[in-house]
């Protein structure tokens, strides 16, 4: 997420040979219809190997249209009800960003109740894991948090419940990971003929209202309120704070420093949420997955947890990571994340889901008063643009089959997002006042959880 007029860019910072996307990470949200009301499902518009985001539209568009990244793929978890023979959804922009959605589709696939579908971490496919083979497919493994706490039992227990389609709730184990904390997994007794997967369930990315990032080697002037705790706890933040104060003072005594930096989004958010702090220095938000080889860690993947409810991904472990029938994996947290499952499982000749695309019949953009059905139906580098506070009403023709355990819906989307320009911010006005109660409540709780003011909140258990 970034505030209006901000300048920011992402650098690659690897972990054991891999790259991670530096910078803010926030996306539009999907809401589903339960027969009575719309409910937030999760954020979407992620990409692989990297999510397409940048400080400006031009840069983000260039990155996206290079066709380097694969779009988002996500299995919908909420209970869905039809209305007039259609599945209805809403696309909501509830944070200070502008999204450019090139393609948006809902597909469905059938599967036996004895099989658990999980999206692969590269967004390539959906694999079916056999529930009744859980015991024989779990190798012996030790799962250790921060080199001292054995969480093997808790993680493996949650793995079983995932395969039984049980959503996360407050009674289940949750490992909160702070920046630079690790989970290490040592799995033994692996067979060469089998594929090895890390099943990772996670949610929540460290987040602060009004995140601002600056382009490398460029000073962004202006004064930002300071978070006293970060000011005292972090030498880096201390230096940054004094630097910002110096810039502020120079601007007032006439040294020509421009202090007209657009802060409208920050002031709107600060007022709406009664926050004194609207500045945050937030680097890469991710869970870095790597394997141990010859005393160093080699990159496998980077997982960006979604905000609203936990999602599960199957990360395939490369064959070269397995030595002497064992593998050593590491999950490294760059920011605060919640990991509810991290365990290794083996499989052989897994079946892939065959999806059938539903027909998009409506994509009505409320603010623009325009329908984007044709544009969203296919990927063609034409975009539906959503500003903070926007809602788009979306409808798909539903299949004849009743929604049951053996039929699932999957969202697929392509596009990118960037900071709002000063012009957009000025035209958009007080967008926070237009948010619905659920979105507003979620953002308040997200900020509260980030600051440590909420324990066992709905944010932690809504999964």
Image (spheres, grey):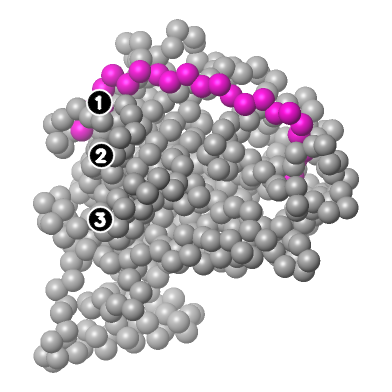
Tell me how far mark 1 sits from mark 3, CA to CA. Answer: 23 Å
Residue pictured at 46% horizontal, 42% vertical: 70
**Element type where label 2 sits in the image:** loop
The residue under label 3 is 58
Q: Answer yes or no: do the residues labelled 2 and 1 have beta carbons within 8 Å?
A: no
Residue on which the image places disc 1: 374
Q: Residue 418 at x, y = what percent?
A: 30, 54
Query: Going by the image, does 73 lie left or right of 436?
Result: right
Q: Residues within 10 Å of mark 2 (few under 14, many from 20)?
A: some
Span shown in magenta = 344-365
Q: Is the C-beta separation of discs 1 and 3 under 8 Å?
A: no
Q: Any magenta on residue 49? A: no
| Observer able to see residue 90 | no
How far across and how far down the image is residue 271, in percent?
23, 60
Which of pointers 2 and 1 lies earlier in the amino acid sequence?
A: 1
- Say which of 442 and 104 sits in front: 104
Q: CA distance from mark 3 to mark 2?
A: 13 Å
């Amino acid at each position: 997420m970034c505030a209006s007029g901000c300048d920011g860019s992402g650098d690659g910072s690897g972990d054991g040979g891999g790259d991670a996307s530096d910078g803010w990470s926030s996306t539009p949200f999907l809401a589903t219809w339960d027969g009575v009301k719309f409910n937030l499902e999760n954020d979407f518009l992620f990409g692989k190997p990297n999510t397409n985001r940048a400080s400006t539209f031009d840069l983000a568009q260039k990155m996206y249209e290079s066709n380097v990244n694969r779009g988002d793929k996500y299995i919908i978890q909420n209970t869905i009800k039809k209305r007039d023979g259609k599945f209805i959804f809403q696309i909501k922009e509830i944070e200070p960003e502008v999204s450019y959605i090139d393609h948006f589709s809902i597909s469905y696939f059938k599967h036996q109740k004895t099989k658990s579908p999980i999206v692969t971490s590269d967004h390539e496919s959906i694999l079916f894991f056999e529930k009744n083979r859980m015991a024989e497919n779990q190798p012996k493994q030790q799962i250790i948090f921060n080199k001292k706490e054995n969480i093997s039992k808790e993680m493996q227990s949650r793995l079983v419940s995932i395969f039984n389609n049980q959503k996360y709730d407050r009674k289940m184990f949750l490992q909160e990971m702070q920046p630079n904390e690790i989970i290490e997994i040592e799995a033994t007794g692996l067979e060469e003929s089998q594929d090895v997967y890390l099943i990772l369930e996670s949610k929540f990315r460290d987040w602060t209202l009004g995140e601002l990032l600056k382009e490398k080697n460029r000073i962004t002037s202006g004064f930002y309120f300071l978070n006293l705790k970060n000011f005292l706890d972090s030498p880096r933040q201390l230096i940054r704070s004094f630097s910002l104060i110096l810039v502020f003072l120079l601007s007032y005594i006439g040294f020509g420093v421009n202090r007209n930096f657009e802060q409208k989004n920050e002031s709107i958010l600060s007022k709406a949420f009664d926050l004194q702090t609207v500045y945050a220095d937030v680097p890469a938000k991710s869970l870095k997955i790597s394997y141990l080889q010859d005393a160093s860690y080699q990159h496998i993947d980077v997982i960006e947890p979604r905000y609203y409810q936990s999602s599960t991904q199957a990360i395939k472990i490369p064959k070269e990571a397995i030595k002497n029938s064992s593998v050593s994996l590491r999950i490294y947290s760059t920011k605060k994340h919640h990991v509810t499952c991290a365990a290794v499982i083996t499989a052989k000749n897994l079946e892939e889901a065959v999806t059938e695309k539903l027909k998009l019949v409506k994509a009505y953009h409320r603010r623009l008063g325009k329908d984007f059905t044709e544009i969203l139906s296919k990927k063609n580098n034409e975009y539906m643009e959503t500003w903070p506070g926007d809602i788009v009403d979306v409808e798909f023709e539903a299949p004849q089959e009743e929604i049951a355990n053996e039929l699932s819906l999957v969202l697929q989307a392509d596009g990118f997002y960037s900071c709002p320009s000063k012009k957009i911010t000025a035209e958009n006005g007080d967008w926070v006042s237009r948010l619905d109660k659920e979105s507003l409540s979620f953002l308040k709780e997200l900020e509260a959880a980030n600051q440590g003011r909420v324990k066992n909140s709905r944010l932690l258990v809504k999964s």
